[in-house]
């Protein structure tokens, strides 16, 4: 069992990732609108959202009080006299322009009735915050079920915004697999994310990523008081059958529900390839755990823990002997990794790279267990095709680390020959190639390796704006993209971009939308395509390709474009200042602003953002055989 001390205080996080919701909340309290109800699970950021929305405005604020249901108008104590009737309270508050009601699910009945009457009879605009899953007074729930006020369910922050918050909290950027893990464990709970990050500051399981300024987290989850409180309903289960079931799932999920006897290693519901004969799961305990929302049984009868945090917490809380009894050897996960790899390979072959779960590989890497280099290379390839270039580089590095560990291990001297050694060398080569491909598309990555010879790919010609070189050599959506670009058909490029996005090719879709923006004759359609391209490009982890170069430069002011273009040719700040009759400081300020907008770390990345020529290897996933 591993306990952690209370986390250090973190700096205040910026408000990010809720721009659309912020505009909606502000509009709801403007003009003739009557307000809005914001709902969501605990820790989702509801209070921060409405607080930002009313910042700088004349707004009264109250909050529900726990255990105050029998105290009339307890929540309104700061705004009302000590003894007041409901009718008089409505009159007294009728002059309030905007009223923010936080934790409205905790309102006493009198306060809830007053809020409802204000919504019905007064001109006061109401911003109501309610936590999902908590009992809500009927007068409050009628605000949206009775259609008095619209309701805004608040979803989790996107992964990209989670990465930004983690970077602010840690003071430096985490590598993508660490971001994925934190995002997954927090499950949209920003308070839990903050607690986890605080517990990790200065932790021995944080390691620098070689060749970058990023850090990685591998190892168990620190059991801080906040994490224990968050999972108390799990850790305090006292029934022996329930706790044994939870711990078995924590170390080997998913497990099958064995209704007709034990399953063997060849059974489709035995994904980790365990030897036949382990005791089946306790069905009575499973039913109780399912009723309490702690486990989930899918359509195939596979049982998993209901929350991504539960497995790591149970493993971290297990005693040494219990962990040794339940833990699997790394090689026992081979069949599960093979199954995940087969699924990803099949999807790539179908030109469909939408997000699919691959929990075994994610879990092993998070716990610091090496994964096969071939598996890591495939995960890198899948991430790269999705446009997640930094994640692709991270997976490729995992594969190379596995190869390096194998070579330096005790058996390394004996591994120099034979089929396994050849397969290992081939997998390492694939990982190196994927790392180069990812780095070539990301100016933010530290060391860009550019091979002398790049493979030829017909679709790459389309991405570079030369579709005639791919004529007759592509199929499906890639052929449609090439044809639309050949005819400079803006609407057809939009359709191709939309299909690429639907299939998960976010970077390819961003490039197609960028090309559509240039092809459209209708200025409105061009603006829409450009907006879509920018939004997708921002989800591609800083990827910069020739097709996006004009898009990136379009985000700069005319003076910034001028300075960036000169800096890309190799001129120093002083030389640029002399040529444009500016101060050196002004040139430096413009370049700094441009770096931020372009996603570049320094001026060494600028030639790749302004030069339309390819600067690295190009993907050949969809290449058709050429005639001899």
Image: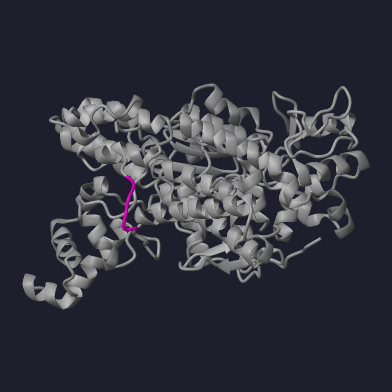
Residue 390 showing in the rendered view: no
Question: Which is nearer the eye, 243 or 608?
Answer: 608
Residue 611 sits above or below residue 469 on the image: below
Question: Which is nearer the eye, 68 or 204?
Answer: 204
Residue 507 sits above or below residue 213 on the image: above
Q: Is 87 placed left or right of 272 in the picture?
A: left
Q: Where residue 422 appears, x then y in whole percent?
A: 58, 52
Measuring 18% from the left and 67% from the top, which residue is drawn there? 567
Q: Is 525 placed left or right of 355 in the picture?
A: left
- Report if residue 403 lies within the magenta region: no
Q: If the image is split into quadrants, where does the C terminus sit?
A: top left
Q: If the image is split into quadrants, where does the N terminus sit?
A: bottom right
Q: Where residue 152 appears, x then y in whole percent?
A: 49, 34
Q: Where residue 89 appears, x then y in whole percent?
A: 55, 38
Measuring 48% from the left and 63% from the top, which residue is drawn there? 173
Question: Which is nearer the eye, 469 or 396?
Answer: 469
**Magenta-drawn segment:** 451-455
Residue 481 quadrant: top left
Measuring 84% from the left and 27% from the top, which residue is drawn there? 258
| Principal secondary structure, stretch drawn in magenta | loop
Q: Residue furthest right?
A: 240
Measuring 80% from the left and 39% from the top, which residue is drawn there? 274
Q: Where residue 198 appears, x then y in whole percent?
A: 61, 64
Q: Is 567 placed left or right of 398 in the picture?
A: left
Residue 142 showing in the rendered view: yes
């Amino acid at each position: 069992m591993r306990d952690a001390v209370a986390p250090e205080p973190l700096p205040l996080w910026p408000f990010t990732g809720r721009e659309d919701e912020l505009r909606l909340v502000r509009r709801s309290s403007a003009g003739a609108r009557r307000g809005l109800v914001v709902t969501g699970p605990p820790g989702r950021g509801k209070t921060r959202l409405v607080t930002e929305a009313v910042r700088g405005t004349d707004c009264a604020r109250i909050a529900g009080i726990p255990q105050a249901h029998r105290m009339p108008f307890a929540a309104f104590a700061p705004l009302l006299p000590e003894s007041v009737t409901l009718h008089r309270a409505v009159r007294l508050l009728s002059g309030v322009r905007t009223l923010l009601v936080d934790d409205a699910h905790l309102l006493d009945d009198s306060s809830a009735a007053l809020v409802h009457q204000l919504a019905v009879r007064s001109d006061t605009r109401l911003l109501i915050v309610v936590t999902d899953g908590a009992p809500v007074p009927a007068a409050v729930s009628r605000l949206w079920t009775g259609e008095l006020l619209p309701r805004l369910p608040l979803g989790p922050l996107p992964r990209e915004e989670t990465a930004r918050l983690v970077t602010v909290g840690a003071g430096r950027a985490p590598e993508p697999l660490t971001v994925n893990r934190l995002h997954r464990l927090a499950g949209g709970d920003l308070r839990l994310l903050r607690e986890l990050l605080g517990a990790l500051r200065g932790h021995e399981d944080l390691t620098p990523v070689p060749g970058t300024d990023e850090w990685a987290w591998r190892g168990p989850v620190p059991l801080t008081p906040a994490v224990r409180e968050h999972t108390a309903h799990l850790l305090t289960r006292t029934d022996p059958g329930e706790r044994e079931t939870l711990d078995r799932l924590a170390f080997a999920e998913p497990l099958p529900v064995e209704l007709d006897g034990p399953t063997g290693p060849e059974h489709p519901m035995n994904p980790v390839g365990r030897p036949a004969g382990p005791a089946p799961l306790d069905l009575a305990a499973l039913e109780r755990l399912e009723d309490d929302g702690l486990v989930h049984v899918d359509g195939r009868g596979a049982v998993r823990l209901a929350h991504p945090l539960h497995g790591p917490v149970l493993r971290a809380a297990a005693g040494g002997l219990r962990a040794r009894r339940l833990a699997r050897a790394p090689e026992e996960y081979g069949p599960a990794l093979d199954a995940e790899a087969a699924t990803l390979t099949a999807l790539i072959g179908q030109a469909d790279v939408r997000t699919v779960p691959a929990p075994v590989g994610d879990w092993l890497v998070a716990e610091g267990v090496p994964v096969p280099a071939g598996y890591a290379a495939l995960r890198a390839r899948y991430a790269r095709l999705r446009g997640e270039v930094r994640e692709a580089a991270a997976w490729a590095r995992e594969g190379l680390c596995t190869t390096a560990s194998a070579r330096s291990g005790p058996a390394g001297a004996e591994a120099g020959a034979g089929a396994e050694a050849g397969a290992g060398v081939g997998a390492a080569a694939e990982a190196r190639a994927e790392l180069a491909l990812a780095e070539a598309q990301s100016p933010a990555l530290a060391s860009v390796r550019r091979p002398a010879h790049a493979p030829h790919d017909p679709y790459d010609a389309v991405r570079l704006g030369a579709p005639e070189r791919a004529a007759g050599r592509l199929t499906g959506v890639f052929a449609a993209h090439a044809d639309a670009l050949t005819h400079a058909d803006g609407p057809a490029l939009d359709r191709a971009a939309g299909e690429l996005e639907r299939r998960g090719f976010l970077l390819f879709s961003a490039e197609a939308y960028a090309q559509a923006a240039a092809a459209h004759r209708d200025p409105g359609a061009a603006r829409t395509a450009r907006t879509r391209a920018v939004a997708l490009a921002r989800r591609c982890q800083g990827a910069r390709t020739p097709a996006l170069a004009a898009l990136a430069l379009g985000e700069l002011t005319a003076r910034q474009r001028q300075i960036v273009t000169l800096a890309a040719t190799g001129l120093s700040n002083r030389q640029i200042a002399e040529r444009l009759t500016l101060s050196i400081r002004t040139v430096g300020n413009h370049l700094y602003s441009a770096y931020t907008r372009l996603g570049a770390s320094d001026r060494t990345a600028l030639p790749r953002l302004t030069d339309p020529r390819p600067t690295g290897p190009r993907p050949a996933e969809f290449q058709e055989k050429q005639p001899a």
